[in-house]
Amino acid sequence: MNAIYGLFPDSNSARRAVAALRAESSRLRIKPKAIEIISCEPLEEEGFGWEEQRSLMPYLAPLGALLGGSGGYALAAFTQRVYPLPTGGMPIVAMWPTGIIMYELTMLGAILTTIVAFLVSVRLPSYKKRLYDPEVTNGMILVGVADPDRDCSGEIGQRLQQEGAAQVKEFSSE
Amino acid sequence: MATNSVAQTNVIDPQPEQIRRDLLWPLFHTSKRFYVLVVVLIAFGIPGVFAYAFQMSRGMGVAGITRPVFWGFYITNFVFWIGISHAGTLISAILRLVNAGWRRPVTRCAEAITVFALAIGAQYPIIHLGRSWLFFWLMPYPSERGIWPNFRSPLVWDFFAISTYITGSLTFLLLPIIPDWAMVRDRATGLRKRIYTYLSLGWRGTPQEWHRLEVAMRVMAVVILPVAVSVHTIVSWDFAMAPVPMWHSTVFGPYFVAGAIFSGIAALIIAMALLRKALHLEQYLKPFHFDNLGKLLLVMSLLWIYFIFAERLTVWYGNQPSEMAAFWAMQRGKFALLFWTMVFCNFLIPFPILAIKKLRTITGTVIASSTIVAGMWLERFLIVVPPLERKYLPFDWGTYHPSWAEITITVGTLMGMILLYVLFAKFVPMISIWELKGGPHKKPAVNEAQAAVRSAAIPLDNTLPSTNS
């Protein structure tokens, strides 16, 4: 993957750059998903990332909970029947204690589903070389275009500079 | 107003670069004091390991537990540490859900306590087993022995509850650490860089990553709260399910949960004060954090004394001979000194300190918290031992004296807990850097900002707040 990116010292200039790239995306042959923004803190409240605000995670957690609860019931009920203990005429599978196991595994199901959903949705862990600059850690906001058209990359770089990029750099994953 | 004055004395916030410098400093610089502390902790902890090894080789006879008191220091410590674990995740989840801005410097200190206290607490049932190498018999797995754990046993419920809680708490702690580890990765070199590269999982900080992290944390906060409550309720059922005088009580669930939160907040305040001093976090852990937590502690102190009163009143009113034997042993008998020390430590000393605003300083809250931690350990001891010493008919009464092995193991695990916390502070920023830099949420601006980026034609500077403003 190749990219051209600018490092912006504040969110205003970064936002201006994103807006400019989007406005001129057809002329500069930039695909909407090719614009990448990277920051060392969440910028949702600065207007970035609104496209990302749809996530299945809150719906997957209850699904995981349901699976966990069912698994809890299966574990407790099935195995109590397979290895029956003397209960003096009381039911082999008593719902009160089985309910406790179900409850805990319901919650465990929700927790594990959330973790997996998070990692899968952001594709982590990933140790491949991807567009990034350690300057982001120092507070810079990276605005870049992945795989830009060769004929337009110079102009994209100029545009980033015009909007206030402190530095414009190129990136190659090779 | 008084509250405002406390807040106003703390409003000068450090700039982002200073935040990064201050909070990453302990990870890149190690003082001699750190090594001395680690050596001291190991020196005091190692006798506990030897005592445990000695107990395993000689059998449970080296512990003070004997008929009829089969639960002593180990179960006391188990309940105590599980209680302390309620500091972090529960408080952090509540404050996260209500979007309390002041939680930001507090949450990680608290969540780390939860994970390590759980890790220490969960060892005690294994230590208590005697034949610890057979601990896996507690786990539900089919075996050729034809034995399956009895799902009616509260000890099996403990296994499920604590496993779920430790999984949830660890996740709740680790998820927001990933961006901070990425920050360390970018500043580190050599082996350290390689380690943090793996730990940060390849985090970059795209809007999608930030958004998913926030969503995951919100979901986790909702899920972890009922788990935290259930864990200490189930620990209380280890007692309440047994027909032992003063144990078989319906109030035990909420009583234990309240006590756990009480001792947890106290432990958190002590940890925060020590971190503040040792890592020079004065600009981040401010007096109003201690003031706010002090108020919470005050509420829990009142709740605790209410539960103590409610529980004892019903026992006294019932006037069952078997229960009254244990009751009077605590009120004016063998355990009276411990009982009244507990009341002093948990209520009579902390209440005025926490209720009087002038005394609710950092020093004041730390003094109150220290007495509370000691008092809550006594409370756990008094729940476990006296009822077992006075169980029903006098022919079955007995006495319990902790042995040197139990005391050494108790001290050893305390040192272990502190050591884990100290090492954690060496490898992880103790305050979430990205959350702290985020500052208070500016929700009203969001829609405007989003609209501006969408339309890409509005003069943005005039409509939106600057990050640096």
Image (tube, coloured by chain):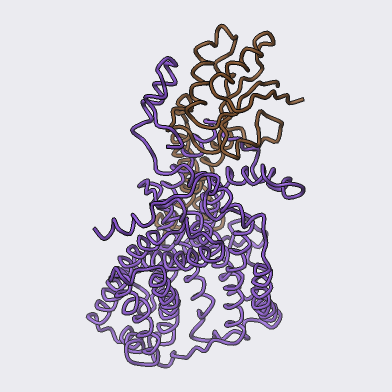
| Chain drawn in purple | B
Q: Quadrant of residue A29?
A: top right
| Chain A representation colour | brown
Q: Is residue B460 left or right of residue B4?
A: right
The number of numbered badges drawn on the structure is 0
**Above/below status of B430 relative to B155:** above
Q: Is residue B398 left or right of residue B191?
A: left
Q: Residue A110: x and y, percent? A: 48, 43
In the rendered view, would you say A73 is above or below B421? above
For residue B437, above or below residue B78: above
Judging depth in this view, the residue of B436 and A92 nearest the camera is B436
Residue B233 placement, left or right of B425: left
In the rendered image, the quadrant that contains the C terminus of chain B is top left
Quadrant assignment, res A1: top right
Could you tell me residue B284's position as x and y percent? 47, 55
**The residue positioned farthest toward the top in the image shown:** A27
Measured from the top left, where is residue B55 in percent x and y?
Answer: 66, 80
Q: Return the x and y of residue B449 as percentages of the image width and height.
A: 40, 26
Give the residue drawn at x 41%, y 21%.
B452
- Quadrant for the N terminus of chain B, please: bottom left
Is residue B259 toward the left or the right of residue A121 in the image?
A: left
- Looking at this view, is B232 or A19 the one in front? A19
